[in-house]
Image: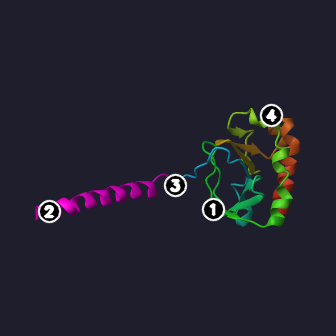
Amino acid sequence: MDSFNHLIMPSFKILLTITALAAAVLTGCKEERVMPGQDYLVFGWYHGACQGEGCVDIFKLDKNAGLLYEDSTDRYPSSTAPYEGQFGLTSAAQYQLVQDLPALLPHQLLTQPIGTIGQPDFADGGGYYVEITNNGQRKFWLIDTNKDNIPTYLYPFVDALQAKIIHLQ
């Protein structure tokens, strides 16, 4: 019996250790991990006083891969945390419609603190969601659709954003 325990127990301990490590990896944080250098732009619009499919439309543009994804969860974005969606690949034609959007992003926006700009969706006017990931760092903003409530440097960008989202519909 001692020779049996001597042979089986070390194997059992190794198997148990491997199982525990695998369980820890598989049940770890479900949040999307952004690898350093994985750059993308997440953008879209949302409307709180709305019903139907077009109330929340959020997209993820991966310029390096030349791909566009659309979120299927259609969750109302939070002003306290980046958007966590389930993104599915769209067509190459849709990517072509928005491929220039990262170049239109105003540099001044990158200096703004994350959170809200203006009063997005305050008077049922909706809001724009913009998130950038650069070298693994995520920054995001909820931007008012009412131009009276946002800085003038954002006007050309939100005009382009609105036009592109409409074309993606």
Residue designated by label 3: 30
Residue closer to the observer: 26 or 168:
26
Whether the magenta-drawn stretch holds residue 10 is answered as yes
Q: Which of label 2 and label 4 is nearer to you?
A: 2
Disc 4 residue type (three-letter): Gln
Disc 1 residue type (three-letter): Thr
Which of pointers 2 and 4 lies earlier in the amino acid sequence?
2
Mark 2 and 4 residues: CB-CB less than 8 Å, in contact? no
Residue closer to the observer: 145 or 62:
62
Which of pointers 3 and 2 lies earlier in the amino acid sequence?
2
Disc 3 element: loop
Residue designated by label 4: 108
Disc 2 element: helix
Whether the magenta-drawn stretch holds residue 31 is answered as no
Question: Which residue occupies the extreme left position in the image?
Answer: 1
Q: Number of labelled discs?
A: 4
Q: Is residue 108 above or below residue 13?
A: above
Q: Main secondary structure of the magenta part?
A: helix
Q: Which image quarter is the C terminus in? A: bottom right
- CA gap, disc 3 and disc 2: 44 Å
